[in-house]
Each structure stands twice: as C-alpha cells, then as structure tokens.
Image (spheres, rainbow, N blue to C red):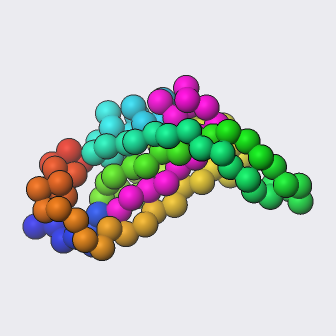
Amino acid sequence: MARVDDYIVVFVIASSVKQAGIIAKELVIQKAAACVNTAGIDSLFIWRSKVEKTKEILLIVKSQRKLFRKIEKIVRKFHSYEVPEIIALPIIAGHKPYLDWINESTK
C-alpha cells in the first residue's frame, strides 16, 4: 500500500506548446505520470550571465517518487533545452481516492 509521501508533483518547463504536448503525452503513455497539466507562463531568469525573459509552458506532473528517474529520462529525450527544469516536490497530504488513482495509472 502506497503512503502519501510516495507521491510527487514534478515541475517541468518547456519551450513551446508543441514540446510540452509531446513530453506530456510520452509521460502518460509510458505510465510515468498519471496526469500532466500545462499552462503558459512568463519566465524571467539568468542564463549565461544575462537576464532573459521569455514565454514558456509549465508542465505539472503528478506521479510517484519511484518514477522520478523515468520522468527525467523521458523529459530529457524530448526537450530542447541544454539544462531543462525537472524538479520534484513531495506531496505531504492528498485526497486518498486521487492518490489511489495516481497509483493505478502509473502501474
């Protein structure tokens, strides 16, 4: 039986809607994620000592901690950035039926 701290939310930033769609679809098809939400965002960051501002797509990936390396591998395969953002945050509490669904969807 999975515990609540076995689940994660992973943030990934993509360069375009097309790239985000490809990554999201692969994550779900390969059962690395139960669900991926996408949203357009404005990003401001420092890259190679220069301040950059750009439009990007945020992917919010719901999965299990044990699948993080699989998620990372899939994202890196389809991502255009030299250093893509792939960061996981633990889920500290959650609606049990939803967490059960994540578990079933990523088997």
Q: Residue at x 25, y 71 (%)?
A: 93
Q: Is residue 11 magenta?
A: yes
81 vs 20, nearest the viewer: 20
Left/right placement of residue 41 relative to residue 71 reads right
- Residue 59 coordinates in the image, percent (x, y): 48, 45
Q: Which residues are magenta?
A: 8-21
Left/right placement of residue 62 relative to residue 59 reads left
Q: Residue at x 80, y 58 (%)?
A: 46
Left/right placement of residue 46 relative to residue 17 reads right
- Residue 78 coordinates in the image, percent (x, y): 55, 35
Furthest residue toward top: 18
Q: Residue at x 46, y 39 (%)?
A: 38
- Tell me if residue 15 comes above or below residue 10 in the rendering: above
- Residue 17 coordinates in the image, percent (x, y): 55, 29
69 vs 51, nearest the viewer: 51
- Tell me if residue 17 comes above or below residue 57 in the rendering: above
Q: Is residue 107 magenta?
A: no
- Image quadrant containing the N terminus: bottom left
Query: Is residue 75 in view?
Result: no
Q: Residue at x 63, y 50 (%)?
A: 84
